[in-house]
Image (cartoon, helix red, strand yellow):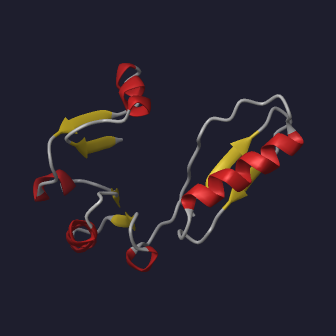
Amino acid sequence: MTVVSPVLADALVEKLDSSSISWIEGTYRLEHLAGAFLVVAATDDQLLNAEIVESATERGALVCDASSVERSQVIFGALHRNESNVTIAVFTDGRDPAEARRTRDHIAGLLDPDCRLEDEAGPS
């Protein structure tokens, strides 16, 4: 996974050390889409997200626009897998990822009161 951003959240900085992600420090440029299979536009600028989605779609990539479910071909849910091989998946049709996480955490807590949750996401 490659993240394009001027700064990284602490949780992503930790993943740099494990080579889970690569980071392009800076702002989005069209060439960042080269060879992309899945593009997630998650800026705080809806117009920029729309531009990214349009450009990625023209290049044949699947897209998720964090600011518009209507422009998304892929949405992400909140997943939890426990040691008993039970998987919980909660989706809000891309409308409220925070509510999906809260609901997932509540259900996981009922099944596994002592569990420590790790955020997992997967496309639908």
- Is residue 68 rendered to the left or right of residue 47? right
Note whether 32 is above or below 120 in the view shown.
Answer: below
Q: How far across and how far down the image is residue 9, in percent?
A: 36, 35
Q: Which residue is drawn at 62% across and 35% down?
A: 118
- Is residue 8 rendered to the left or right of residue 47? right
The quarter of the rendered structure image containing the C terminus is bottom right
Which corner quadrant of the image does residue 2 belong to?
top left
The quarter of the rendered structure image containing the N terminus is top left
Q: How far across and how far down the image is residue 46, in percent?
A: 28, 70
Q: Nearer the viewer, residue 35 or 83?
A: 83
- Is residue 19 rendered to the left or right of residue 74? left
Note whether 28 is above or below 2 in the view shown.
Answer: below
Q: How far across and how far down the image is residue 91, in percent?
A: 64, 64
Q: Which residue is drawn at 44% across and 31% down?
A: 11
- Name the residue at the bottom extreme: 70
Q: How far across and how far down the image is residue 50, in percent?
A: 26, 73
